[in-house]
Image (cartoon, rainbow, N blue to C red):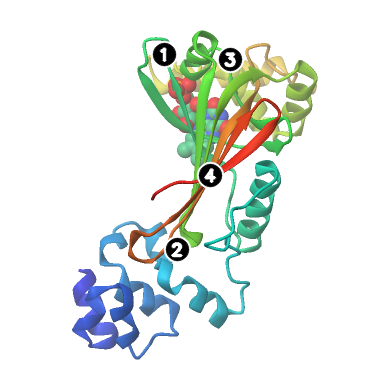
Amino acid sequence: MARADCRRACGKPRCHDGGGAVAACPELLNRDLLLRCSSPGLLESPAARSAWIPPDLRQLVAAVQGAPAQEIPDNDRMPSGDPIEAFLEAVGRARAQQIDTAPAVLATATPQGRPSARLVLLRGADARGFAFFTNYTSRKARELADNPYASLCMHWPTLEEQIRVEGRVERLPDAESDEYFSSRPRGSQLGAWASDQSQVLPSRGTLETRYQEIERRFADVPVTRPPFWGGFRLVPDRIEFWYGRADRLHERLLYRREGTAWHTERLYP
Ligand SMILES: Cc1cc2nc3c(=O)[nH]c(=O)nc-3n(C[C@H](O)[C@H](O)[C@H](O)COP(=O)(O)O)c2cc1C
């Protein structure tokens, strides 16, 4: 399907080759055609279709669209300093491109080393670590109680950036969970009460009935935070920034914490 689209779009079979061959497309500056011509393997999902730009062409497209080009570390210069600041700068750059930077894959593992991963929304990042919120009786929370080491992984396809964070997870103080819970929409607050997250649900109707009961319980009063719901903070000891580059010569910049100091290393892609 992608090949047929490409022929319709620009009539140049060489465009199928991707990479530099896309330069043969006479519609190079048309972002939509450029996507269709250069990334047949990535055309399956609608999100990818609307979002993905080949790494070789990102700087060009950014220039054409008037967007700031991605700030990337110089090949010969090792970055130094604070990875949290680097993370916040990366988030700022991504948000300027209308990228939703909240979703992150959270991986946990049992003490026996059996891993599980799921998406959560990152709700804060600062010098103390990376915060997310969930049900304290969920599978992830139970795994974290038994084995507090976890990792977060973020991917921003349009920037070809991946950020990996690893470290020890601790519960947020109740006051911080209260503050975040009170900022949530009322429906989400009621939903948090209604869900025995990760437990077997006999039927959809059971959940809806529970929600209605909770609605009645909190009718006309603010919804307080359930005692079984709150935040965690991952305190990082490893943060890696990955930048997509041509010919799979990607950049990998690793920050490793030793005591209170961060050390930086470059990794093979
Ligand atoms: C985009 C997205 C964001 C999500 N954010 C959260 C979140 O912030 N907290 C949460 O508990 N679950 C969130 N979920 C649901 C989790 O992925 C998961 O299904 C749920 O937490 C149960 O996981 P567990 O059984 O491994 O504990 C999100 C799912 C998606 C698709």
- Residue 33, compared with residue 269, is above or below; it is below
> Which residue is at the front of the view, 103 or 89?
89
Q: Amino acid at mark 3?
A: Tyr
Which residue is at 61% across, 38% downward? Answer: 263
Which residue is at 51% across, 24% downward? Answer: 150
Residue under circle 2? 51
Residue under circle 1? 110
Q: Picture quarter containing residue 261?
A: top right
Q: Nearer the viewer, mark 2 or mark 1?
A: 1
Q: Nearer the viewer, mark 3 or mark 1?
A: 1
The quarter of the image holding the N terminus is bottom left
The answer to which of marks 3 and 4 sits earlier in the sequence is: 3
| x, y percent for residue 167 | 56, 26
Labels 1 & 4 near each other (Cβ < 8 A): no
Residue under circle 3? 136
**SS at badge 2:** helix
| Mark 3 close to ligand 1, CB under 8 Å | no
Residue under circle 4? 265
The answer to which of marks 4 and 2 sits earlier in the sequence is: 2
| x, y percent for residue 249 | 38, 59
Q: Nearer the viewer, mark 3 or mark 4?
A: 4
Q: CA distance from mark 3 to mark 2?
A: 35 Å
Which residue is at 80% across, 20% downward? Answer: 175
> Which residue is at the front of the view, 44 or 97?
97
**SS at badge 4:** strand
| x, y percent for residue 161 | 49, 54
